[in-house]
Amino acid sequence: MILIVGATGTVGSEAIRRLSSLNIPVRALIHRPDKAVSINAPGVETVVGDLDHLESLERALDGIDRAFLISPLHQRQVELQGNFVKAAQRAGNIHVVKLSGLGTSLDSPILSGRWHAQTEKQLIDSGLPYTFLRPPFFMQNTLSLAPSIAKNGFFESCIKDGRVAMVDARDIAAVAVAVLTKEGHRDKVYPVTGPEALSYNDVAEKISRVIGKAVNYRFMPPENERSQLLKKGIPEWHVDLIVQFHTALSEGLASEAVDTIEVLTGKLPRSFDQFAREHADVFCGR
C-alpha cells in the first residue's frame, strides 16, 4: 500500500486520483477527520495524523511499503519531515519519494532549498530507499497573478528576465505515480520541468493570446516586492523566502528544461499554452 503525505494539496490530491484510477491501494494522511470529504477518489483509505506527532505517523505507516512525502513550507519543515523519516525507519524498508524543489542543496541561496537538502540528507543517511523529485516552479503559481491581470492588465514581480522551466503540478504527480508504482527508481534524483523555459514576458504574451486582451509584465525591485507582500500580512520569514525564490529565478536557476516527464511517464509534459487555455476563465477574472 502507498501512503500520501500532503494528500489534500495540489500534487498530493492528483497523485491520489491517479493511483485510485489504477486501482492501487492508497492511504491518505489527513490532519483532521473533516478533511476526508476532500478525498473524493474511490477506494482510498484515510488516516488522521500529523508530522508533529511521531506516534500518529507510525500508525499511518502500518502496512505501507511506499510513501510520497509532501508538506507545505514551514519554518520547522526540516524537523517535521525529519519526524516522518524517523517513523519510516521504525516501520521498516519503506521507499520514500520526497517532493523537493528549486535550488535543493545544502549551500542553496534559497532557504527552502537548504531545508529540502537537509531532509534529503536525512533520508540518505537513514538507509531507506528514496527518490527525490525536484520541480523548480509550478505553473499553478501563475494563477496568483490572475487578479492583477484581470483588473489592471499587468502583473509585477522581481523575476526580471529570468527564464523558468515551469511545470504543471499534474505532471509532477504523474511522475510521482510512475516512481511509486514501477521498479528502477530507488536512490534516484529527478529534476522535473515543463517543456520550455519561459520569461514572465513570455508568460504575459501567452496569456494575452488566450484571453484576447493585452497583458504586460512589469519588473518590480525586490525591496518593493518585499514591502508589498508584508502589507498583505504574509509572515516575514515567508516573504523573505519568496523574494529569495524570485531572485534565484531571475538569475537563471530554473532555466534548463529536461525530459524527465516524457521518459518516466511516456507522455509529453503540458506546455504553458495548454495550461493558459485551461485556465483562461481564471486569468479573465471569471
Image (cartoon, helix red, strand yellow):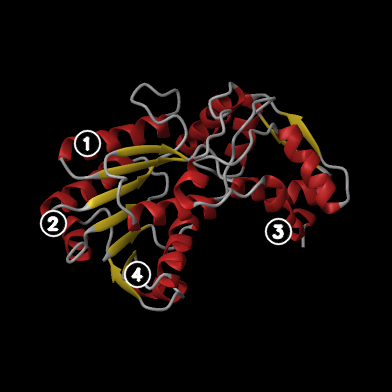
Q: Residue at x 47, y 34 (%)?
A: 102
Which quadrant of the structure image shows residue 196? Answer: top right
For the residues labelled 1 and 2, say whether their Cβ atoms are less than 8 Å apart. Answer: no
Looking at the image, residue 264 lies above or below residue 222: below
Q: Is residue 279 visible?
A: no
- Can you tell which mark lies on residue 124? 1
SS of the residue at dot 2? Answer: helix
The residue labelled by disc 2 is 91
Q: Amino acid at mark 4?
A: Ile
Q: Find the distance from the CA under tag 3 to the CA under tag 2.
A: 42 Å
Pointers 3 and 4 in contact (CB under 8 A)? no
Q: CA distance from mark 1 to mark 2?
A: 16 Å
3 or 2: tag closer to the N-terminus? 2
Q: Which residue is mark 4?
A: 24
The residue that label 3 is drawn on is 278
Q: Please name the amino acid that badge 3 sits on.
A: Glu
Please state which of the two labelled residues, at mark 2 or mark 4, is closer to the viewer.
4
Closer to the chain start, of discs 2 and 4, is 4
| Label 3 crowd bin: few (<14), some (14–19), many (20+), radius 10 Å | few
Name the amino acid, label 1.
Answer: Ile
